[in-house]
Amino acid sequence: MDNFRIYNQATAALLALEAAPLLLSPSMAAWMASSEPKTVSAFETLVARELGFALLLCAFLALLFSGELHRLWDDAENVPSASATPASPYSSATTIATLLYHLATGILMYISGTSAQLSGVLIAGALAHMALGVAGLLVLTFANDGKISKRTGADKRTSGFLFKNNAHVQKHS
């Protein structure tokens, strides 16, 4: 299993984990979010459940557009090699979208956690989102297969971003 698959499965698992309390006990989640104790209305319960379903939908879409569900179906049908199937054309866009989501949510949870009653839970959530955001950045930077030259063994698709090939620059200047 490569890093890209691990990242997408971890993203879907975290979103499903966040959706679970909203779906199983929406009134408790809405009650914990309020600053003063009060009775939770039916509308707040409905909004909490809808948010839980939206998180589950985001988890499903992250798996779908990354090509992960296609790989799972191929594995279930006993296709000899799941890596032989072409990658999803939306996999990079999905990784960028989930990377931005994780970074923004991590920052928001950290800022909210420094002054809230549930600071421990929010800081733990912020750390989980930030870790997945950094993992997404690493996957985008280093997880491409590239085109390896048979003659030199170098990656032909590198642009010099992050790591510059000084030997090549000196040789051809």
Image (cartoon, rainbow, N blue to C red):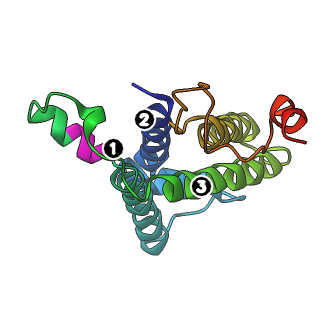
x and y, in percent, of residue 121 in the image? 67, 37
Q: Answer with mark 2 or mark 3, whichever residue precedes in sequence.
A: 2
Check if residue 172 falls in the magenta segment.
no
- State which quadrant residue 131 falls in: top right
Which numbered marker is on residue 5?
2
Image quadrant holding the C terminus, namely: top right
Tell which residue pokes out farthest to the left in this image.
77
Name the residue type under label 3.
Ile
Label 3 to label 1, Cα distance in Å?
16 Å
Q: Judge whether 149 appears above or below 40 on screen.
A: above
x and y, in percent, of residue 66 in the image? 40, 50
The chief SS type of the magenta part is helix
Name the residue type under label 2.
Arg
Residue at position x 61%, y 35% in the image: 155
Name the residue type under label 1.
Glu
**Secondary structure of residue under mark 1:** helix
Label 3 sits on residue: 96
x and y, in percent, of residue 134 in the image? 69, 38
Residue at position x 42%, y 71% in the image: 42
Label 1 to label 2, Cα distance in Å?
7 Å
Q: Is residue 145 left or right of residue 77?
A: right
Q: Between residue 63 and residue 40, name the one nearer to us.
A: 63
Which numbered marker is on residue 111?
none
Label 2 Cα neighbours within 10 Å, binned few <14 / some 14-19 / many ≥20: some
Label 2 to label 3, Cα distance in Å?
14 Å
Label 1 sits on residue: 68
Q: Is residue 109 left or right of residue 14?
A: right
Range of the magenta residues? 68-72
